[in-house]
Amino acid sequence: MALLVQKFGGTSVADPDRIREVADWVRRRRKAGDEIVLVVSAMGKETDELLRLADAVSGTRPGREMDMLITAGERKAAALVCMALHDVGVEADSFTGSQAGFITDTNHMNAKILEIRPERVKESLAAGRTPVIGGSQGVSTERDVTFLGRGGSDTTAVAIAHAVGADACELYTDVSGVFTTDPRVVDNARKMNHISFEELLEMTATGCPKPAMRSVEFARTYGVKLHIRSAFTWEQGTWVSEEDPAMENAIISAVTHDTSEAKITVADLPDEPGIAAKLFRDLADHDVNVDMIVQNVSENGATDISFTSPHEGFDAAVSVTEACAVTMGSGTVTSDNDIARVSVIGAGMKSNPGVAATMFETLAKAGINIDMISTSAIRVSCVVREAEAERAVQELHQAFELHKPV
Ligand code: ADP
Ligand code: ASP
Ligand code: MG
């Protein structure tokens, strides 16, 4: 018998049949003796629809009202899941984020959890019932409803798992686990039975959409065991835990790609102290997210700086950079929207040289030009043309033989 948190994503509860299937799965697990806390996302694409609706109605979209609107999607799903549970004989209680004790800061649309007071959830469990929590929401220190941001239900699940001391947190989705690469891009991508937090964090930081990166960070910090698995086949998925130091690591575990960023280059900057500091301070002060940064070797006292930044908010990033160039009295700003970042990730890279060489050779053989390069201890990333990203992923997956079981 175990105490489990089970989180169901939008596709897992997309329609009445799916909701009944989820309820039946919970019934079977309860019958087998497990205690369960459920966390649900909004049904299907409802969050996107609510965002569109807000856009259609309002030009100002006040944060407080946006959060009230969006979190309604998860509350609706929680109530429906509870009804389906009652129908199959499982006593269940739905809870909003606030009722479940999620206290957050006041940062609407992207609130951070400050504290969890899970008394009502614990009482429900103690009474032999199944609590069902609306994901991605809480109540702020100003007593307003808050939304934890896109993908926030994963964070709700991990946080409640920690707060109630669950044995594991199961994140159910439309694929059977974490794959060696996006299974939509490579046919023979392989489901991994196990992955380390370190590797999964690098994957989620470089384009793997699930689970939400924040939830993986939270799980690692608090030692919550994660199991990413399918709500369609119910088979065993991918377990995430600390790396086992006794284990031989695969040199490369996964290939990711990310098309969510664009590139800005500032050419002809004076090569002197304070220039990069000024540019990136201005960007930070305007809340511009910056990812890869590359500075060229200077020629005749002038240098170029390129960096990537999300498409969302990219126009602001360009204007801040242009304004900065004007105040510095130098630098020509250009931008490039059609880029993608392709990354290879693997903990075994630490002790095996040659990964970067193999990656660059593979891309060269495929005639794919590399625009920027960056590395971490367990990752090598290349910026390439967006149109070539999927082919790059396919070539790299093949070159590192990721389809073969380790
Ligand atoms: P949802 O619609 O459930 O909110 P997304 O569609 O954003 O979530 O993310 C789930 C999808 O992520 C999967 O259907 C899968 O195609 C894709 N994906 C990309 N890379 C990977 C990977 N390495 N492992 C598993 N799934 C991946
Ligand atoms: N439904 C929200 C989203 O799609 C939050 C979540 O369920 O994670 O981003
Ligand atoms: Mg999906």
Image: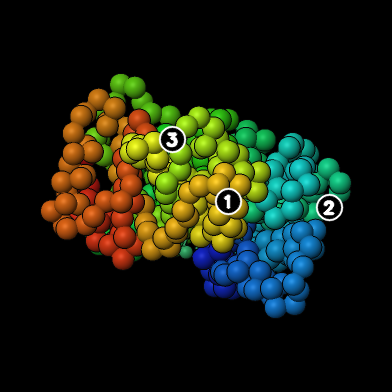
Q: Which residue is mark 1?
A: 326
Is 97 situated above or below 1?
below
CA–CA distance in space, label 3 to label 1: 16 Å
Q: Which residue is mark 2?
A: 144
- Foreground tag (1 vs 2): 1
> Quadrant of the image for the N terminus?
top right
Q: Earlier in the sequence, mark 1 or mark 2?
A: 2
> Quadrant of the rendered structure where residue 83 is?
bottom right
Amino acid under disc 3 = Asp
Residue 38 is situated, as x and y percent measured from the top left of the image, at: 62, 51
> Quadrant of the image for the C terminus?
top left
Residue reaching furthest to the bottom: 56
Residue reaching furthest to the top: 246
Tell me if I can see residue 406 in this picture.
yes
| Badge 2 vs badge 3, beta-carbon distance below 8 Å | no
Q: Which residue is mark 3?
A: 271
At 67% from the left edge and 61% from the top edge, which residue is drawn? 74
Q: Nearer the viewer, residue 10 or 262?
A: 262
* Left or right: residue 92 compared with residue 170: right
Residue reaching furthest to the right: 142
Q: Earlier in the sequence, mark 2 or mark 3?
A: 2
Q: Nearer the viewer, residue 60 or 72?
A: 60
